Amino acid sequence: MTMRIQACFVTLVLLAAATAVAAPQAPKTPAPRDPELIDVRAYQKLLEQYHGKPLLVTFWATWCEPCRDEYPMLNELAKQYAPQGLRVVGVSLDDDGDLILMRRFLARYKPVFPNYRKKAGGEELFRQGVLPSWNGVLPASFLYAKDGRQIGHVFGEGTRDTYEAVIRALLTSGSN
């Protein structure tokens, strides 16, 4: 009888262990967070954070077809030029209603650069804070020299050649 109880106990322990191993495991990496919301003040602080580094800031949205076409290329360029000091930041102009699409988009392209999302409201003030002559056309990318000066921009979908030229100019501007 004691042998039978021990055998049942061992069997139960083995079954429990097998169940634990077979159970789906929680992912080891935390789930990606939604991009932080920013307004014009936070955008200016963001620029200050990158002072001393050549910076390309790209504004995009999931509802903007040229943005969806351009974004993977910018991700590749960010990887390619990072060793030379280029920093890239994305700012999504997606509304709250587009959050699921934005999450899927970011999950699909796995950007190597940080992304933020513009807070709702204050569009005109925000655009004025980025570039007074910017009418909000997307995609839009702005280039900042190491000293923080805005030295160029690309409005509408840019080609790889266009971006490579402006990135090379950005990387050589203000280099000592």
Image (spheres, helix red, strand yellow):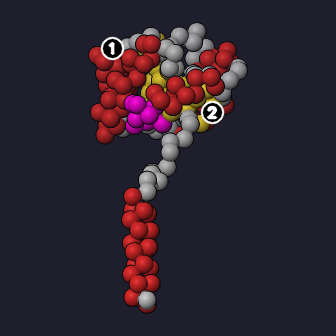
> Which range of residues does the magenta coloring cover?
106-114
Q: Horizontally, is 122 left or right of 102 in the view?
A: right
Q: Residue at x 42, y 78 (%)?
A: 8
Q: Residues within 10 Å of mark 2 (few under 14, many from 20)?
A: some
In the image, is residue 43 part of the stretch drawn in magenta? no
Give the x, y percent position of residue 114. Answer: 48, 36
Residue 99 at least partly seen: yes
Percent position (x, y) of residue 28?
Answer: 44, 54
Q: Residues within 10 Å of mark 1 (few under 14, many from 20)?
A: few
Tell me the residue that label 1 is attached to: 159
112 falls in the magenta region: yes
Type of amino acid at the residue the image marks with label 1: Thr
Residue depth check, mark 2 versus mark 1: number of the one nearer the observer: 2
Rounded to the nearest angstrom, the CA distance separating label 2 from label 1 is: 29 Å
Quadrant position of residue 34 = top right
Task: Indicate the secondary structure of the residue bearing disc 1.
Answer: loop
- In terms of depth relative to the viewer, which is nearer, 82 or 111? 111
Q: Measuring 44% from the left and 17% from the top, which residue is drawn there? A: 67
> Against 156, is 25 above or below?
below
Q: Nearer the viewer, residue 102 or 154?
A: 102
Give amino acid for label 2.
Answer: Leu
Pointer 2 with pointer 1, Cβ within 8 A: no
Tell me residue 108's x, y (percent): 40, 31
The spot of residue 142 in percent (x, y) is: 48, 21
Circle nearer the N terminus (2, 1): 2
Drawn side of residue 121 relative to residue 143, left or right: right
- Establish if 22 lies above or below 102: below
* Residue 167 is at least partly visible in this image: no
Q: Residue at x 39, y 58 (%)?
A: 22
The label shown at residue 37 is 2
